[in-house]
Image (cartoon, helix red, strand yellow):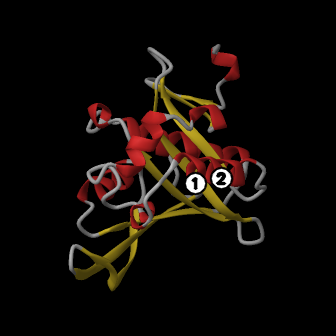
């Protein structure tokens, strides 16, 4: 793959559309790994190749969603996904969600770089006004990543999510176009 075929390109990673070819044993194991999926809503359903393919297929033609594979530039390795959407075109807002499935890539700034690339695309190409994200209060890693990417804590929904036998808060973040810095 050449740099010209990347959807978005950063320093260490590039983002490209997720394809059905990405649905493989590695992707399957990510979604069924309790450590990887502990904060993903997909953890409530055992994932299989058919279900994963259906999900990827369902997002490929959506006009309100940008679904991208996070890939390392050095070896073209697919390490996770990031999604912008659904996009509300009337209010010009969208949600960002992501996961890094390759655990050897955790803590290396790749999630932050992915979010920054998607934010740049959202504001500079799509002219969105606001992008949002949310995480479980115990998902300290995600909270740090969104703050590092320039997001601010917007609201906390008390006792909103059931996790490991008790309710915990959902932390919601926002980044406005006027707050965005390249």
What residue is at 46 percent from the left and 39 percent from the top? 27
- Tell me the SS state at disc 2: helix
Find residue 136 and report its horizontal and vertical position in percent: 32, 69
Q: Is residue 181 left or right of residue 160?
A: right
Q: Position of residue 166 (x, y in %)?
A: 22, 82
Instruction: Inspect this view and state whether residue 32 appears.
Output: yes
Can you give x and y, in whole percent of width and height, for residue 46 in the image? 43, 59
Q: Which residue is mark 2?
A: 54
Number of on-image labels: 2
Say left or right for 61 vs 86: right
Q: Which residue is more in the foreground, 84 or 20? A: 20
Could you tell me which secondary element the residue under label 1 belongs to? helix
117 or 68: which is nearer to us? Answer: 68
Quarter of the picture holding the N terminus = top right
> Residue at left 30%, top 79%?
169
What is the C-alpha distance between the residues marked 1 and 2?
A: 5 Å
The crowd level at tag 2 (other Cα within 10 Å; few <14, some 14-19, many 20+) is few
Location of residue 132 with respect to 101 vertically, above or below? below
Q: Which mark is residue 62?
A: none
Residue located beneath label 1 in the image? 51
Asked whether residue 182 appears in the rendered view, the answer is: no
Crowd class of label 1 (few under 14; some 14 to 19; many from 20; radius 10 Å)? few
Residue 26 appears at what percent x and percent y? 43, 34
Dividing the picture into quarters, in which one does residue 20 lie? top right
Q: Is residue 151 left or right of residue 168?
A: right
Asked whether the residues under the numbered discs 1 and 2 touch, taking CB atoms below 8 Å apart as contact, a structural biologist would say yes
Is residue 44 depicted above or below 83 in this figure? below
Nearer to me, 172 or 2:
2
Q: Is residue 117 above or below residue 95?
A: above
């Amino acid at each position: 793959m050449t740099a010209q075929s990347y959807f978005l390109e950063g320093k260490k990673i590039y983002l490209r559309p997720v394809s059905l070819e990405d649905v493989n044993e590695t992707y399957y194991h990510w979604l069924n790994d309790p450590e990887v999926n502990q904060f993903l809503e997909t953890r409530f359903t055992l994932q299989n190749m058919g279900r994963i393919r259906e999900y990827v297929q369902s997002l490929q033609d959506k006009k309100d969603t940008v679904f991208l594979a996070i890939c390392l530039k050095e070896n073209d390795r697919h390490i996770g996904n990031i999604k912008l959407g659904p996009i509300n075109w009337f209010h010009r807002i969208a949600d960002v969600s992501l996961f890094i499935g390759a655990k050897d890539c955790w803590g290396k700034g790749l999630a932050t770089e992915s979010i920054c690339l998607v934010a740049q695309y959202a504001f500079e190409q799509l002219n969105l006004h606001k992008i949002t994200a949310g995480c479980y209060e115990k998902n300290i890693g995600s909270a740090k990543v969104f703050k590092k990417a320039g997001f601010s804590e917007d609201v906390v929904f008390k006792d909103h999510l059931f996790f490991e036998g008790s309710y915990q808060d959902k932390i919601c973040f926002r980044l406005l176009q006027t707050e965005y810095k390249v």
